[in-house]
Amino acid sequence: MEVIIVPDPEKAALLTARILAKELRARPDLVLGLATGRTMERVYAYLAAFHHQEGLDFSRCQTFNLDEYIGIPATHPGSYRHYMDEHLFSCVNIQPGNTHLPDGAAADLAGECRRYEALIREVGGIDIQLLGLGADGHIGFNEPLSALLSRTREKALTPATLAQNAAMFGGDPAQVPRRAITMGVGTILDCRRVLLLATGMAKGSILAQAVEGPITAMITASALQLHPRCQVVVDEEASTHLQGQEYYRWIFDNEPEWAEFRDLDALDPRAGLP
């Protein structure tokens, strides 16, 4: 696992988007795992900017989202399909048939979970998976005590998660669906590369537990310590509780693979614009 600390949330989103864009340029038929939430909105805005200003091509890639709510249609403004259409898919030249999310309105939810796992296998697996971090350390909707080898399945959401996601439902946790389909922790660990983005002081303590604490089902993000190629991008505020800050900064400043990403001002698509 590598931790990259940048000054603020904007630069964290920019770096994350640049990493994803590099992967897509290197492999136009990339299989990209996606996440939702406010933290990701800036990432998708940057990817859309790279498409319009730099010709970043999404026409051959495929995407798989981590999760979707159960019991609301894809057209519902709180659905993750609606979120992805609004923030990314409608903004780039991706083929609609190449964008995949679990169907939370399926009549056979268990069958839908099996179908989603099979579809991921059918395309050869996910090349790079984008992740956020829940307030209790969950990834996807893998709430505390989710099995670390779990696969795509139905999951009940905790009150903390309902409160965290209430903004998409008019700010009322009571309106948030109580269950969701989520990729399992094991499904995520199968991805060839993982990129987790976490920003803000509120994520500081749980981030430190996930990155530097013991591996535990109570904090499902801690399972990423087992992944052979996992990068964690954080801003200064989220890094507050990390014990290894000095080492993480040294790695970013000295490892050759990160050289092209160090001048984040130059990597901003707005650089040089009035």
Image (spheres, helix red, strand yellow):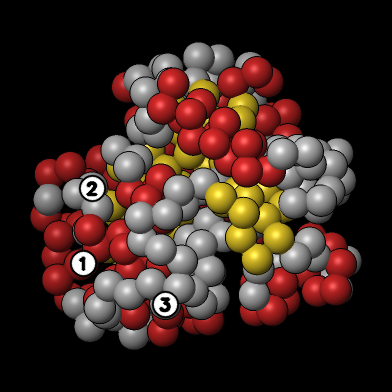
Name the amino acid type tagged 2: Arg
Residue wearing tag 1: 249
Residue 150 in view of the camera: yes
**Comparing labels 3 and 1, the label whose residue is closer to the camera:** 3
How far apart are the alpha carbons under marks 3 and 2?
22 Å
Q: From the top left corner, tell me how far across and down residue 8 is, in percent.
A: 46, 67
Which residue is at the front of the view, 36 or 142?
142
Name the amino acid type tagged 1: Arg
Choose the circle earlier in sequence order: 3 or 2. 3
- Residue under the point 85% across and 73% down: 174
Q: From the top left corner, tell me how far across and down residue 240 is, in percent.
A: 36, 83
- Quarter-wise, where is residue 171 in the image? bottom right
Residue wearing tag 3: 218
How far apart are the alpha carbons under marks 3 and 1?
28 Å
- Residue under the point 51% across and 46% down: 152
- Quarter-wise, where is residue 243 in the image? bottom left
233 to 89, vertically: above or below:
below
Residue wearing tag 2: 229
How far apart are the alpha carbons under marks 2 and 1?
18 Å
As helix, strand or loop, the secondary structure at mark 2 comes to: loop
- Quarter-wise, where is residue 123 in the image? top left
Q: From the top left corner, tell me how far across and down residue 46 is, in percent.
A: 55, 41
Residue neighbourhood size for the residue with mark 2, other residues' Cα within 10 Å, grouped as few (<14), some (14–19), many (≥20): some
Choose the circle earlier in sequence order: 3 or 1. 3
Residue 208 in view of the camera: no
Q: From the top left corner, tell me how far across and down residue 41 is, in percent.
A: 63, 51
Which residue is at the front of the view, 122 or 22?
122
